[in-house]
Image (cartoon, rainbow, N blue to C red):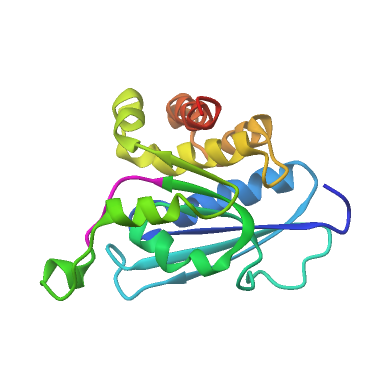
């Protein structure tokens, strides 16, 4: 990454999925590498189940933490419908990293809209230059916790190289942010997420 270059990642999901923590892990990885990082979040009305969008920008000269439409290098979608709703942020040749796990919105649960996450994933797969879809169930089962999906998504991000960060950078961020008793589990999730990209 050149000194003037800024790379941007938009993360979106619903409350309780760890979207904000994932953005902070990415920012910590950038700072551990000596880069500047800025983050910003917009959180929906519900702590759990409401929309959550996190902006992460890294580089040397960052004018604003907010990502303009059509300029994100990466979009990480923790939920297919939320990813579809925020696709306007991704640049034409950007990278998508998506969880296949669907979280039905309140409106769909009340019968006010027909929501099909599989249709969203199929539509999203044609966007960007690379689309990586992660099935979280295998990762969660192997690591023994549903709270590791955000770290797995960060691992996939590192494996794409799209933000100028690699697995060693993410590992350092985990060492900084994670309690020692949780570190081994999260390191495993990180590498499993990266493996989802390498298997393609």
**Residue 17 to residue 132: above or below:** below
Q: Magenta: predominant secondary structure element?
A: loop
Magenta stretch: includes residue 137: no
Q: Nearer the viewer, residue 32 or 115?
A: 115
| Residue name at image x 36 percent, y 51 percent | 121
Q: Horizontal placement of 68 versus 188: left or right? A: right
Q: Position of residue 12 (x, y in %)?
A: 45, 60
Residue 141 vs residue 24: left or right?
Answer: left
Q: Position of residue 186 (x, y in %)?
A: 46, 31
Looking at the image, which residue is at 68% across and 47% down?
163
Is residue 146 shown above or below 43?
above
Where does residue 180 sit, x and y in percent of width and height? Answer: 50, 29
Which stretch appears magenta? 99-104
**Residue at the location (44% across, 28% down)?**
181
Which one is in front, 73 or 65? 73
Q: Going by the picture, which residue comes out furthest to the left?
A: 111
Q: Is residue 79 visible?
A: no
Point out residue 124 in the picture as x, y percentages from the top left corner.
Answer: 43, 55
């Amino acid at each position: 990454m050149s000194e003037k270059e800024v790379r941007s990642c938009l993360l979106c999901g619903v409350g309780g999925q760890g979207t904000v923590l994932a953005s902070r892990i990415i920012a910590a990885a950038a700072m551990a590498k000596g880069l500047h990082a800025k983050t910003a979040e917009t959180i929906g009305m519900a702590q759990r189940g409401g929309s959550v969008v996190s902006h992460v920008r890294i580089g040397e000269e960052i004018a604003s933490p907010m990502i303009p439409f059509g300029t994100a290098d990466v979009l990480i979608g923790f939920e297919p419908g939320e990813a579809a709703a925020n696709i306007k942020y991704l640049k034409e040749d950007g990278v998508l990293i998506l969880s296949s796990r669907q979280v039905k919105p309140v409106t769909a649960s009340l019968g006010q809209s027909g929501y099909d996450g599989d249709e969203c994933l199929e539509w999203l797969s044609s966007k960007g230059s690379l689309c990586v879809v992660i099935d979280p169930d295998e990762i969660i089962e192997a690591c023994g916790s549903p709270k590791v999906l955000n770290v797995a998504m960060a691992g996939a991000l590192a494996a794409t190289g799209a933000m100028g960060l690699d697995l060693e950078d993410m590992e350092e961020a985990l060492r900084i942010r994670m309690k020692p008793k949780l570190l081994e589990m999260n390191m495993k999730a990180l590498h499993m997420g990266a493996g989802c990209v390498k298997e393609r």
